Amino acid sequence: MLGAVEKDADAARSYVANHPKVKVFENDIREISPREMIAALKLPVGERLDLIAGCPPCQGFTRLTENNGRRDRRNSLIREFLRFVVELKPKTCMMENVPGLLTRGKHYFQELKLGLEEAGYSVTYQVVELANYGVPQFRRRLVVLASRSGSIAIPRATHADPKNARKIKRTRPWRTVRSVLSGMPTPPLRSAVKAGTAKCRLRWHYARDLQPIVRKRLKHSLGNGAGRSKLPAALRLACHDRRPDGFYDVYGAMNWDEPAPTMTSGCTNASKGRFGHPKFPRPLTAREAALLQSFPRSYKFEGSGLESVARQIGNALPRRFAKVVGAAVYKQLRSATGSNRS
């Protein structure tokens, strides 16, 4: 890896802490010149990058914005990815986003695909379930791969539903919440850490303080395996009664023996989704959410607070899947040019 672009200051600090040899451009990508970036990276004249990878913000293409009609100005960042590829002409490129880019954002996707093809790339794309690649989390994502020398096949699934894994050749059962979190130490409360009366055995491994009624909601979910739709009247929120067709997973507990639900920027908040711990009436810690995103325990997160770190975790492409896609790109590069720079 030679360089990266990251606007969020905390995320940029985290990246530098874990990848000190990579030059990070902490700026809005719309204000960066591809040519000036290449000059700063000191890439030899005439040598092309092997890969440009991008994960433009996906919030504008999600189910939430489909329901409330919100428009997100970040949607156009898809064009910035295309701008860099067209100008720098890397040997391959990869982009990840939510499946909604094919529906709500279909004009952006068509613009991207046509632009890549006109620039000489063979484009393949597919919506995949990341649990099928060893990520301990259900997370459906659109993957776009493009190459100037032949096409890159979408990687074959390596995992499957335990009911079908034996029937599908060369697949293993999904990785579960239990397989990732069962050995984690009991976390202290955030208030105790801030007060200096408790310490984290792992950085960012502390739980949010909860109001008693929220703890009761999570305790009820633990015993009933459901979210807010099964809460008794005394524990329900009035807004949920007014909108019974809203998000059902809030105040829900995860299942030990399944992959986790999709980690979002609200992954440490029980009111933002089914982010209750499967054994204790509390939400996930940031470190637990990071493990479910397949970050290693040693990964360093720098941030101004829990909300910043949770945002970085929820917005990330799971490391395990990135490795799978990287291997497919590397195989294509070797077969075409024998290059090993990335």
Image (spheres, grey):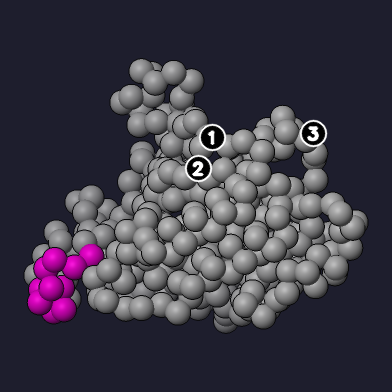
Disc 1 marks a residue whose amino acid type is Ala
How much space separates mark 2 and mark 3, taking CA atoms?
Answer: 21 Å
In the rendered image, residue 90, in percent from the top left (x then y), is placed at 71, 52
* Residue in the picture at 23% in, 65% down: 247
Secondary element at image label 1: loop
Secondary element at image label 3: loop
Give yes or no for contact between labels 1 and 2 (Cβ–Cβ under 8 Å): yes
Crowding at dot 3, Cα within 10 Å, few <14 / some 14-19 / many 20+, comes out as: few
Disc 3 marks a residue whose amino acid type is Gly
- Name the residue carrying label 3: 338
How much space separates mark 3 and mark 1, taking CA atoms?
Answer: 18 Å
Is 79 on the left or on the right of 10, as rendered? left
Q: Nearer the viewer, residue 191 or 169?
A: 169
* Residue in the picture at 44% in, 18% down: 169
299 vs 123: above or below: below
How much space separates mark 1 and mark 2, taking CA atoms?
Answer: 7 Å
- Name the residue carrying label 2: 124
Residue stretch rendered in magenta on the structure: 238-247
In the rendered image, residue 188, in percent from the top left (x then y), is placed at 51, 66
Sequence-first disc among 1 and 2: 2
